[in-house]
Amino acid sequence: MRFALDSADVSAIRFGISPGHELAHAVRAALNPAAHPLQWGWFRGMRDRIPAEPFALLAEVIGADSYMPDFLSATPSGEMAPDDEAARLRLVSEDRIAYDLAKMVRRSEGARRRRLQAMVDDPASAREVIADAWSAVWESALAPHWDQLVRIARADIAVRARRIADAGLGSMVDSLHSSVSWDGGAMRVRTRFHTEDVDGAGRGLVLVPSVMMAGRGCAVITEPPAVPTLFYPAQGVSTDWHAPPADAAGALAALLGEGRARLLLALHRPRTTSDAASDAALAVSTASHHLAILRGSGLVDSTRDGPRVLHARTPLGEALAARGPVGG
């Protein structure tokens, strides 16, 4: 698969996070744990909590491999929250629901094919039951671990952004996965089931690290109205990625001091001094002092945005914060 990117597309390459994509691959990991060894610990912890009927419905819609309906994932953004994804899912057009599910019908057989066809015939009802099932499975499968999943994704994004700064866009693209390469003005992706030449047409490209997808390959969304999107396995996913972070948060406080640790953890997205101080339960003057020390240590970067100064974690800061609790 080849993504042709002109100068307008290159200037619009950005990163995102997708709750919908993560949940879809969580369903696939639960359907076939043997193909997802890094998810075994997560699976053991959630398999007795997940609601059977909603899970079974999502499993039929998503399938165990290959294509899944594009409507399950919005065009991801850095601030896409699970509640936003759930609300968006209820607003997908009936035509889009029917179009994507018809693809699943062609890839299924027997009773599953008949049930999917019934959804195609009544897309409004299908949208409601799928959205209800999405919310039910989300609460049991990923909601308890979403903060940690987001930390891993943001740490990956920070590393990729640093690589662009140090070695250029092509080097960063080459580092995403063994199946992805940069070839002049195009990104090439080896896929198992699909080949296509995609013209960015000025829409850019969204790069999305994924914790739940298997590491053997990448996934793409290419059909409008979605922006061309590449999902790739995130760095830093271990068998205990889902583990409670309380002990590591204490270790971070022992290393940096409690106030500076709270501030670093509060910078899960760019924040003003006053916002970060509020999240960390610190006086603004104290937060300003700690931020100066964190900045001098290479853990925080500060940039001016109009009248505001925004503070964000550097790649080193992301690495240190990767096991502490996310701020509000």
Image (tube, helix red, strand yellow):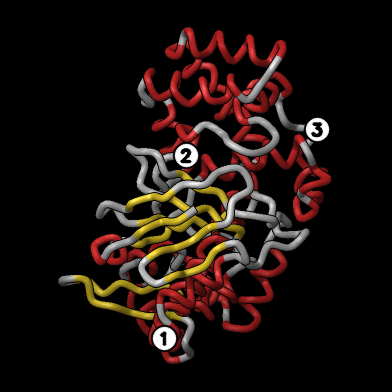
Choose mark 1 or mark 3, whichever is in front: 3
Label 2 crowd bin: few (<14), some (14–19), many (20+), radius 10 Å: many
Task: Name the amino acid, label 1.
Answer: Arg
* Residue 231 % position (x, y): 53, 53
**Residue 79 versus residue 251 in the image, above or below:** above
Which mark is first along the chain, 3 or 1?
3
Query: Which residue is identified by label 1?
Result: 295
Identify which residue is drawn at 47% across, 19% down. 127
Q: How many marks?
A: 3
Any part of residue 328 in sight: no
Foreground pick, 212 / 240: 212
Identify which residue is drawn at 44% across, 85% down. 166
Identify which residue is drawn at 41% across, 38% down. 84
Q: Are marks 1 and 2 in contact (CB under 8 Å)?
A: no
Query: Which residue is identified by label 2?
Result: 73
Choose mark 1 or mark 2, whichever is in front: 2
Label 3 crowd bin: few (<14), some (14–19), many (20+), radius 10 Å: few
Query: Which residue is identified by label 3?
Result: 48
Which mark is first along the chain, 2 or 1?
2
Foreground pick, 147 / 183: 183
Task: Name the amino acid, label 2.
Answer: Ser
The residue at the far bottom in this view is 296
* Residue 283 % position (x, y): 37, 72
* Residue 178 % position (x, y): 62, 66
Residue 11 is left or right of residue 141, and the answer is left
